[in-house]
Image (cartoon, grey):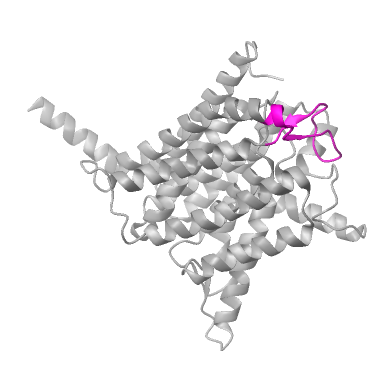
Amino acid sequence: MNLYNSLETINSLLKSLGIAKPSGQGWLAVVFTFFLALFITWFLMPTVRKFALRVGWADQPNARRLNREPLPNAGGLAIYAGVIFAVVIATLLRPIELQNVLAQVLTILLGGSILVLVGFIDDQFSLPPNLRLLTQIVTALLLVANGIIIKVTFGTPVDATLSTLLTVLWVVGITNAINLMDGMDGLAGGVSFITAMSLLAVSAQIPNKAAATLVLAALGGGAMGFLRHNFYPSRIIMGDAGAYFFGYVLAATTILGKLQVTTIFSLVPPALFVLLPVLDTTQVFVRRLMAGKNPLSTPGKDHLHHRLLAWGFSQRRAAFTLWGISLVFNIIAMGIQHMSALQMLATTLGIISLLGFTVWQRMRAVGKVGVGG
């Protein structure tokens, strides 16, 4: 009887955390996908780094980045491999029903794959900004064509056109926001991890977001595995390939389930999850346009993290500060999405614990005792 009561208590706790069927395999599949992506990315990154150094895949010191020596820029390839492998294995094992959402998963991964390829080519050979933008628009339209769309319902004859335009603007904007934020060790990876895990917690509560839940689990695992090697002092960066992949997948998963917009305020909840990179990119765009510069092709030290560094913050402290701001925005977003206080607390503690463990692992690897600075 005691064993039965203990199991009932555990089931009740899991249900309170948002797991509808604790005895089922669905939530176990999500956990499996997360850790599989984590381990693949974590252990693949050193191999990718060594190969990148050997063949010259590295970012030279420039006006945008803070590195003072060539830094391998192929981390996005390891992230991509970890995420794709984890999702494929989870799909083949079929621990959860994927038949109805498989098309959505494949659409997101196809668009992400295209951007990884274009981003990687850009990392090595510097593609024209217009070509990169065109590719982003095409991958956004790919989502629209497969029903992953922000559906405008103003009751006007142009609702369909507005839906397409808004979806393209959303996807392209967030993709570039994550990419432009990737200028300091640990920043883009940490913000992407926080956003992915928060979105995962929300999507797990919604039946029609099974595709988002699976992909976000893999993306969160990939981000954590990458951070182990990217937190200051970084050994490798994600490059445009990784930043485009993170931005695109996060943008797509926020609108899975046909987000309906009846007023402009309908966009507030999903926007809060990515508010930090959006605010950062917006202020950079405005400043560069006012200066008569091309916002997409003009590097500069005008991002939020550059301002923190100018105020005397170390890279670690700046990363922690911006992670904290991003986490606050995500907590607010989770609250607006009607998550319970217990679910929000569990998600927040989980994010902080996993980030803390990753930073500790990185510090231990470089022979540091603490994580201050």
| Closer-to-camera residue (121/197) | 121
Does 103 sit left or right of 6 as displayed?
Answer: right
Q: Give the residue at the far right of this rendering.
A: 291
Q: Give the residue at the far left of this rendering.
A: 1
The answer to whether 232 is drawn above or below residue 85 in the figure is: above
Q: Residue at x 47, y 44 (%)?
A: 84
Q: Is residue 68 visible?
A: yes
Residue 64 is covered by the magenta coloring? yes
Where residue 219 sits in the image (x, y, percent)? 50, 43
The answer to whether 284 is drawn above or below residue 60 in the figure is: below
* Res 171 quadrant in image: bottom right
Where residue 136 sits in the image (x, y, percent)? 65, 60
Does 324 sit left or right of 16 as displayed?
Answer: right
For the stretch drawn in magenta, the main secondary structure is: loop
Q: Give the residue at the far bottom of this rendering.
A: 157
Where residue 372 sits in the image (x, y, percent)? 67, 19
Q: Residue at x 54, y 25 (%)?
A: 358
* Res 231 quadrant in image: top right
Q: Is residue 17 visible?
A: no
The answer to whether 45 is drawn above or below residue 33 in the figure is: above
| Magenta part of the chain | 52-73
Query: Which part of the image, by quadrant, shows the C terminus?
Result: top right
| Closer-to-camera residue (321/107) | 107
Where residue 146 sits in the image (x, y, percent)? 47, 68
Q: Residue at x 49, y 28 (%)?
A: 353
| Closer-to-camera residue (112/293) | 112
Query: Which part of the image, by quadrant, shows the N terminus?
Result: top left
